[in-house]
Amino acid sequence: MNKLKEQYIKKVIPAMKEKFGYKNDLAVPSMTKVTINSGVGQALKDDKFIDMVVSTLTRITGQKPVLTKAKKSISAFKIRAGMTVGAMVVLRGGRMYDFIDKLVNVSLPRVRDFQGLERKSVDQSGNLTIGFKENVMFPEIKSDEVERIHGLEISITSNAESYDQGVELFSLLGFPLKKK
């Protein structure tokens, strides 16, 4: 069993039951999925950029990304309906826990001038979204091999019912949230 899942069962569930008064272990909020997304807007001029983003997401997550297509044509951005505009990976179960463990304990500490995650990154439904301008903080990405740096967005979806429950869940799981 993953150590983050073990921590969830042994520490997070009892703490959340005590604070919010849950009667049942299954009523305690948990993480349901992680979505890693990267836009490929620069790919309009360079087709190799899409391949690079796909390869980066595959290395980071261990899973092949799905290419997302534009639903509408937007002339101001030179996008036509059906063009590839991004790549995304959805992780659940064991891979999700492995990825989050790596994110919290390895990748976030490698971010330059990192002071902690803003509490406003948690939305009213208790989901956490983090955006990165660079992808080089992940250990699978060697900085000397990277031709072009691209950003990515990580959304961690939970079944928490409120902002407070989401903040408490993520801080108990070890996410470095800033103090108020």
Image (cartoon, rainbow, N blue to C red):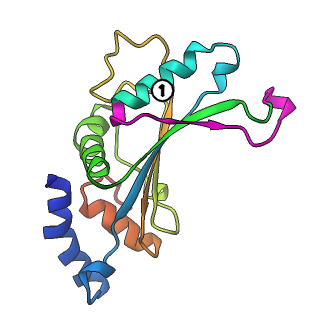
Badge 1 local density, few (<14 within 10 Å), some, or many (20+)? many
Quarter of the image for residue 55 reads top left
Residue drawn 25% across the image and 59% down it: 173
- Give x and y (percent) for residue 56: 42, 25
- Give x and y (percent) for residue 136: 37, 24
Figure check: 5 above or below 39: below
Q: Is the C terminus in the top left, top right, bottom left or bottom right quadrant?
A: bottom left
Quarter of the image for residue 16 reads bottom left
Q: For the residue marked with disc 1, what is the amino acid?
A: Val
Residue 112 visible within the image: no
Residue drawn 51% across the image and 62% down it: 123
Q: Is the N terminus in the top left, top right, bottom left or bottom right quadrant?
A: bottom left
Quarter of the image for residue 157 reads bottom left
Residue drawn 25% across the image and 46% down it: 98
- Give x and y (percent) for residue 107: 29, 35
Report the residue marked by disc 1. Answer: 54
- In the image, the segment drawn in magenta is 60-79
Q: Under tag 1, what secondary structure?
A: helix
Is residue 69 on the magenta stretch? yes
- Give x and y (percent) for residue 29: 35, 72
What is the total number of numbered labels drawn onto the structure image? 1
